[in-house]
Amino acid sequence: MTAVLLIGFVVLLCLGFPVAFALGISGFVMMMWIQGTSALPALPTIIFESLNSFTLIAIPLFILMGNILVGARISRDIYQVIRDWFGTWPGGVAVSTVFFSAGFSAISGSSVATASTIGSVALPEMLNSGYERRFSLGIVAAGGTIGILIPPSLFMILYGSLTDVSVGKLFIAGILPGLLMSGLFLAYVVAIAWLNGNRGEQKLPWAQRLASLRRGFWGMLLPPIILGGIYAGIFTPTEAAAMGVVYSLLVAFVVKKMTLADLHPILLNTTKTTVMVFFIIMGAKIFGHTVTMLQLPQQLIIGLGELGVSPHMFILLIGILFIFMGDFLEVVSITLITLPIIYPILVAMGIDPLWFAVIMCIFMEFALITPPVGLNLFVIQGLLPGSTTGEIFRGTLPFMGLMALTLILVVAFPSLSTWLPQLMR
């Protein structure tokens, strides 16, 4: 029956059904097959319970916060501060793009939003500064993937809501690996620029740099407020998201002089994204309920035990599965489909859920820039007419190597993802 469920899901996808409906329909039909008409009364309860979570409130709030920063052009001010202060490094514009990727990731929570913002702000600057087109496309697409690793992260919120692991600890677990990956990107960019004779931009006068800092200062305060508050135990991730929205609105209206008319498209875009995510969550809950009825996790635990699969081998197999699924599905769908199945297995194997969350997150980053459905590839392609996903993918290859190195280090040294959460209050 499990095979029938999976085949039904794949067939619906091939017929062009949205992921949310493919999950919900295939799961509900199998429920009807097993339980008959008695499955009908359970459906509203399953759907209600899928969204009845205080943790999930953080998703629309973080999406709204990121959209406010983009709509009010606060993100551009932050990029300009970074460029004015770090543009003198070898490969100054590219270096600024990496710093901006890490910085905006600490605000956005979404890789697609991060890639879109970085692309719209930094890509024209890199091309106008004479950087190779493929390199520019690659660094922007790869830099966007950091958005689901450095907190706040929508992926971590979903992971926490599905597993009851502390979202605050999940956020903190991603900090060191995210900074490590950003540092590797930065070292590569500086090395390539130095070898190519790019010694950076001319140093700006202090007056100009300080003026830039004044414009971007209030926006740059947001990540310390959110992460500092969570780490210090002042508020939960959901409360941090609400604080972030309030603070962003204050900066947008008071400092950037945004009007209520400017807020309308921001709210509309936030609503569209939130509805898409929540529909997928509802469909995945129905699908997951059916998977539980079929006792698939228990069967896999028994099968893996009989085969003598080690925890590291299990992680490798799951990673390959994630990258393969990333060829056809986006991160939210992959998470909601697979995590309810594999989480009981990793618990049975004694794998630290925080450590696994970071590993899973890095594998998801690969999925975001892997053709044919890597979302970041299409986001960047839409920003530069005439570019192709193949060209962008080739530009990301060096950065994918650095992502793989980060993954190896996290696997080899679990404390990279577990040390900071252990220090939390």
Image (cartoon, rainbow, N blue to C red):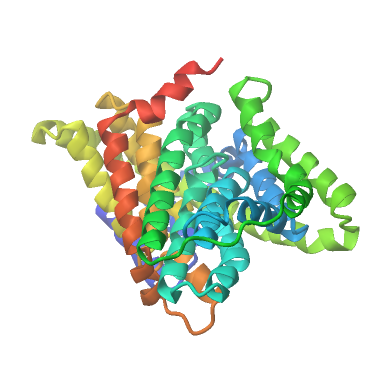
Residue 70 drawn at (x, y percent): 70, 58
Furthest-left residue in this view = 307
Residue pictured at 69% horizontal, 32% vertical: 225
Q: Is residue 218 left or right of residue 41?
A: right
Does residue 119 lie above or below 86 as drawn? below
Residue 13 drawn at (x, y percent): 40, 67
Q: Quadrant of residue 8?
A: bottom left
Residue 217 seen: yes
- The residue nearer to you, when weighing 309 against 103, is 103
Q: Is residue 20 left or right of residue 56?
A: left
Q: Quadrant of residue 157?
A: top right
Q: Quadrant of residue 11?
A: bottom left
Q: Quadrant of the C terminus?
A: top right
Does residue 187 lie above or below 303 as drawn? below
Residue 5 seen: no
Residue 210 drawn at (x, y percent): 75, 47
Residue pictured at 61% horizontal, 49% vertical: 108
- The residue nearer to you, when weighing 127 against 232, is 127
Residue pictured at 15% horizontal, 36% vertical: 303
Furthest-top residue in this view = 425
Residue 92 drawn at (x, y percent): 53, 59
- The residue nearer to you, when weighing 311 against 151, is 151
Residue pictured at 49% horizontal, 63% vertical: 140
Q: Is residue 205 left or right of residue 59?
A: right
Q: Is residue 39 left or right of residue 184?
A: right
